[in-house]
Image (cartoon, helix red, strand yellow):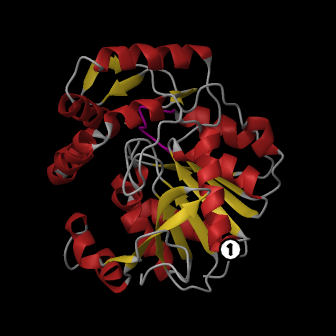
Amino acid sequence: MMRPPFAGAARIPGKMSRRVRGCPFRALRCGGLPKIHALANPPEPCRARALTRAVPAGSMRHMNVLRDPIGRSIVDAAGLPLSMLEAGPADGPVVVLIHGLGWDALSLWRGTIAALSEAGFRVLAPDMRGVGATPATEAAYSIDLYAADVVAALQTLGVTRLAFAGFSLGAPVAAAAALRHGGASALVLACGGLSSSPQAEAGTENMLARVATLSAREFAMEQAEAIFHPAWAEAHPGAVAAFIERRTAMDQDALFRAFRSARGIDLRASVAGLGVPVQVIAAAEDSFITVEALRAIADGIPGARFAVLPDCGHMAPVERPDLFEPLLAEFLTAIGAPA
């Protein structure tokens, strides 16, 4: 996952003299779904047994995952068969989790889904176009298109009031979806910005031209080195290897279009006027977007909360679930969604 056009050059952990340029965010750096939501395929239970490999056996988080089956349905999103994960009580307050570039909903959010559903939330997590179980399309991908997909799926599901949370590239998608939906009760922006720049977009194009000469595996290995904190990567070689395998297997054309999806965006003023509680989360050692950049975003939103996760690289939900998940649950509960 290269740095989105909101951020300047990204440091590759462990190689202090080398920097990766051109991510689109160079901002400053189940039971299954109910009723008739499926298009062609019936709800497919993603039981926790298949999800436990990344969760230490015997840990409380391991036990939470085992208790919380995650359902998957294919939801009609204005004609797009969009894959949607769901967990938690059907009558719980709804939160939608939107993954970042180069990830799918299950690989990024499995622990967060378990934690929030255990706390009483109904959690929805879509796969964006071209990743997970949602097919790629020929369209030019954009933040607005991703947001439109999410909102269309929510309309199919009949969800009228909910909180949006997005990570990395998912942050501007969550913001755009909240603006488009009309029923947002809260917004969480984690490790992702709200605007791009011509310099960032030029850097993205240069990066894509360079990596076009690499194999999919070589690109995935380079990205793995960039996104994880070095100490975390060293302690979790299996998780890093799994990321490389997933990224290598992805539709590379769809991935390249995802890198271009944030071109020309600037949602800062719109989000500042959204009028809902906002939580901004930064990672202290994020090489893609700085703490200062995210603090500036929070400062520009009236009443926004701001938190920094210590000893953490860009992949906050994966590297520090012990901090990320309680922070998210606490914020969603504090704004009035009973847990």
Amino acid at circle 1: Gly
Please state if 269 lies on the left or on the right of 211 as rendered. Answer: right
Range of residues picked out in magenta: 282-289
Q: Nearer the viewer, residue 67 or 45?
A: 45
Residue of label 1: 158
Is residue 287 highlighted in magenta? Answer: yes
Q: Is residue 170 visible?
A: yes
At x 60%, y 39%, the residue is: 143
Please state if 322 lies on the left or on the right of 55 as rendered. Answer: right
Question: Circle 1 sits in a helix, a strand or a loop, which is it?
Answer: loop
x and y percent of residue 306 in the render? 63, 50
x and y percent of residue 5 in the render? 53, 26
At x 59%, y 52%, the residue is: 149
Looking at the image, how many numbered discs can be counted on the residues? 1
Please state if 220 lies on the left or on the right of 39 as rendered. Answer: left
Q: Nearer the viewer, residue 106 or 8?
A: 106
Q: Nearer the viewer, residue 149 or 178?
A: 149
